[in-house]
Image (spheres, rainbow, N blue to C red):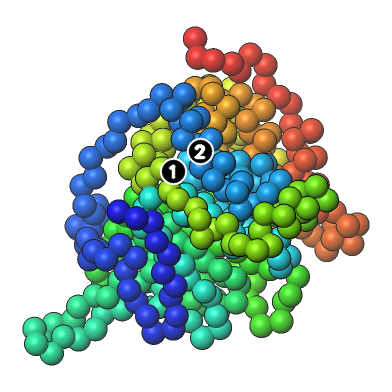
Amino acid sequence: MTSRIQSATPGSGEQASGRPPYPADASGNGRAHGRPGRVSLDELHEVARRIAANIERVLVGKPDVIRIALVTLLAEGHLLVEDVPGVGKTSLAKALARSIDCTVSRIQFTPDLLPSDVTGVSIYNRQSGEFDFRPGPVFANIVVGDEINRASPKTQSALLECMEEHQVTVDTTTYRLEEPFMVIATQNPIEMEGTYALPEAQRDRFTARVSIGYPDQQAELAMVDEHAGHNPIEDLQPVSDGETVHRLIETVRGVHLAPEVRRYAVDLVSATRQLPEIRLGASPRATLHLVRAARAQAALSGRDYVVPDDLHTVAVPVLAHRLMLTTEAHAARRSATDVVRAVLHRVPVPQGSGPRQ
C-alpha cells in the first residue's frame, strides 16, 4: 500500500484508505486489533532516524522541530504547527505523512467547510431504501489539517471526538478510526483577519505545539541550492509503515516511569495552576500528554526509563500552548514559554529517579 494524500473540499467525503469504516459495538469498541509486538530500542531508534532523515530533506536545519514531531507521533498525540507563513509548516506535516506508508488525507480548512466535510455524511440510497455512510477525510492514519483556524468553530469542533477518542459519531452510529491516528494541524498566528481562534478545548487536545522559526543563513543557503528548482516532497518515499509505527508506540508505552518522576510530572503541571500570572493552568489531560511525550523522548534517547531531563525537554512544547496568561502578564511581555521555563526552575527535581531497580 502506497502512502497518498488526498484533499478535502466542501462537499467531498471520500475516505483516504478506500475501505468502509468499521462501526463500533455497543461497548464503544471497534474492530478488534491484534496487539502488535514491541520492538527493541535499537530498532525504534533506527526507524526514527530514517523518518527524521527523510523529513530533513524537506525541512533543512530544524532537527529539534523534527524530533518533537517524532515524539508526538510515538506518544499517540497530535501536533499543532504554529508559525508565520513561508517557514515550512505544511512541508513538515506533509513530509512526516509521506515518510510513513499508511493512509493519509489532507484537509484545507476554509470558512465554508462543514463538519460533515471532515467526518463524513449519511446519504440516502434509493435502491436499498437506507442511508449509506460516506466517510470523510478524517478516516486515515495521518490527517493533515492546513490552516485549521480558518474554519468556523462549528467545523473545528468536528475534530474534538476524533482527536480524543479516536472515533466518529454520525447519526447515532459510532465508527472507530484507524490506528495509529494522528492529526497534524497548521495555523498562522499573525494574520487574524478571516480566522477563528482555536477554543481551549481544541488546543488542549493537541499534545504539542511547535514553532519552526526562520532558518539560519547556512540552512537557508542550502535550501536555496537544493529546493529552488525542485520540490523535494515529490521525491520522498516511505521509510516505514503504519504497522511498524504501531509497534513503536507499544514499545514507548512500556517505558518505565518511576514513582518519583510521576510525582514530578504532576508537580510541574500543578504549579502552572498556582502562578499569579496565569489565568488558566494546564489540565489533567496535559499531565497525561506530558508523561506520554516524556516516555517517547526517553525511548528516542535509547533508554527504557524516564528521567527528569525528558520532562524538561518536552515541557515547553506540551504545556505552553495550554496556558492562558493574565492581562498583567501580557503587559509585562511575559509569554507562556517564559512561564513554563520558570516553573521548571521553581519545582524541585527529584533525586535518585533513574532506571528501575
The answer to whether 315 is drawn above or below residue 257 in the figure is: below
10 Å neighbourhood of mark 2: few (<14), some, or many (≥20)? some
Secondary structure found at label 2: helix
Residue 85, position in %: x, y?
71, 68
Tell me the residue that label 1 is attached to: 239
Q: Residue at x 43, y 48 (%)?
A: 238
Q: Is residue 294 left or right of residue 337?
A: left
Residue 347 location, quadrant? top right
Residue 182, label in figure:
none
Q: Is residue 131 left or right of residue 179?
A: left
Q: Amino acid at mark 2?
A: Arg
Instruction: Looking at this view, name the residue that lies furthest to the left.
Output: 128
Label pair 1/2, CB-CB below 8 angstroms: yes
Label 1, label 2: how many angstroms apart (C-alpha)? 6 Å
Secondary structure found at label 1: loop
Mark 1 or mark 2: name the one nearer the start of the chain. 2
Q: Residue at x 61, y 24 (%)?
A: 307
Tell me the residue that label 2 is attached to: 50
The answer to whether 117 is drawn above or below residue 249 in the figure is: below
Residue 348, position in %: x, y?
74, 26
Q: Is residue 127 left or right of residue 216?
A: left
Q: Nearer the viewer, residue 273 or 223?
A: 223
Q: Amino acid at mark 1?
A: Val
Instruction: Looking at this view, name the residue that lies furthest to the top.
Output: 357
Q: Nearer the viewer, residue 327 or 127?
A: 127
Residue 120, position in %: x, y?
33, 74
Q: Nearer the viewer, residue 325 or 198?
A: 198
